[in-house]
Image: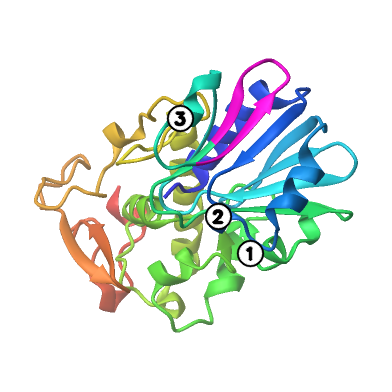
Amino acid sequence: MPELPEVETIRRDLSRSLVGRKIRSLAITQSDVLRRTEPVRLVSAVVGRAVEAVGRRGKNLMVALTDNAALLINLGMTGQLFVADSDAHSEQHTHLVAALSDSRVLVYRDVRRFGSIELVAGRPVEESETLRKLGVDALSDSFSARGLAELLSWRRALLKGALLNQSLVAGLGNIYVCEALHRAGIHPATRCDELAPGQFRALHAAIREVLREAIAAEGTTISDYVTGNRVPGGFQERLQVYGCEGEVCRRPGCRATIQRIVQSNRSTFFCPRCQGDSTAGGQSRAELE
């Protein structure tokens, strides 16, 4: 957390707030959030440059600057990136403040400091080591049902863990994988090589559907996440399984109780009726409707 919908929401907000503005000054209070970048070099590279665009790849933000430089930002678990009035830099856990030419500031806050900021200069940001390691973006045109099947169908790994692997599919995290598996009617403990072609199609459709709905709601706020305008998201009100242990499944006609299991030290939420038996590969969406 934040996952693709939260990062995409922030990207859209920052695009409206940052593009065309110059960075007048840069203050760094915690240099350990910088990756492969020295503080002095970062200040020298960005001050005086204007923001040309704000992009996204998976869970990573790309702030493109003039003169072929860019900031590559990953928000980790608790990172926040927003534009605010100039007094926001005094808040606790603020690690970087960029003063803008419109008298506002771009603020990076991170309670747990698992996020990172990296300067990429003199080459396209897509060629950075960080982005080269990523798989296909879950909302890109390149992410297809057939491609998902080709990527996963031969793997013996559990499906949920494979979907969380950013080198395979970029952008998914625990919340939206749980939600997509529920919509697709697939048990989270199913092995990748146990899925039928129809289940890959249902899973692909569910992933795209839940991500787009979450973006429309400006993301999910469980604890720290805020948009680029520093307001909470709204998709937490529409979660069907994530964080719903002990509640009745909301799928029409299903009165089963949402359960929680632990997979790779992470909580997984699912409906034992809608999502079937992991040993049978779960049920397809078509079988459930």
Residue 251 visible in this rendered orientation of the protein: yes
Which residue is under mark 3?
90
In percent of the image, x 48 and y 55: which residue is there?
Answer: 172
Q: Is 46 displayed left or right of 97 in the figure? A: right
Disc 1 is placed on an element classified as: loop
Task: Please name the amino acid that badge 3 sits on.
Answer: Ser
- Please, is residue 173 above or below residue 253 in the view? below
Task: Please name the amino acid that badge 2 sits on.
Answer: Val
In this view, the mark in front (1 or 3): 3
- Give coordinates of residue 147: x percent, y percent: 63, 64
User: What is the distance, in whole Å, between disc 1 and disc 2 at their CAs?
Assistant: 24 Å
Q: State the image quarter where residue 232 is shown.
A: top left
Q: Front-most of 44 and 178? A: 44
Residue 227 visible in this rendered orientation of the protein: no
In this view, the mark in front (1 or 2): 2
User: What is the distance, in whole Å, between disc 2 and disc 3 at their CAs?
Assistant: 18 Å
Q: Is 197 displayed left or right of 254 in the figure? A: right
Q: Front-most of 10 and 205? A: 10
Residue 33's disc number? 2
Q: Front-most of 99 and 209? A: 99
Based on the picture, tell me whether residue 103 belongs to the magenta stretch. yes
- Give coordinates of residue 15: x percent, y percent: 67, 28
- Please, is residue 286 above or below residue 220 in the view? below
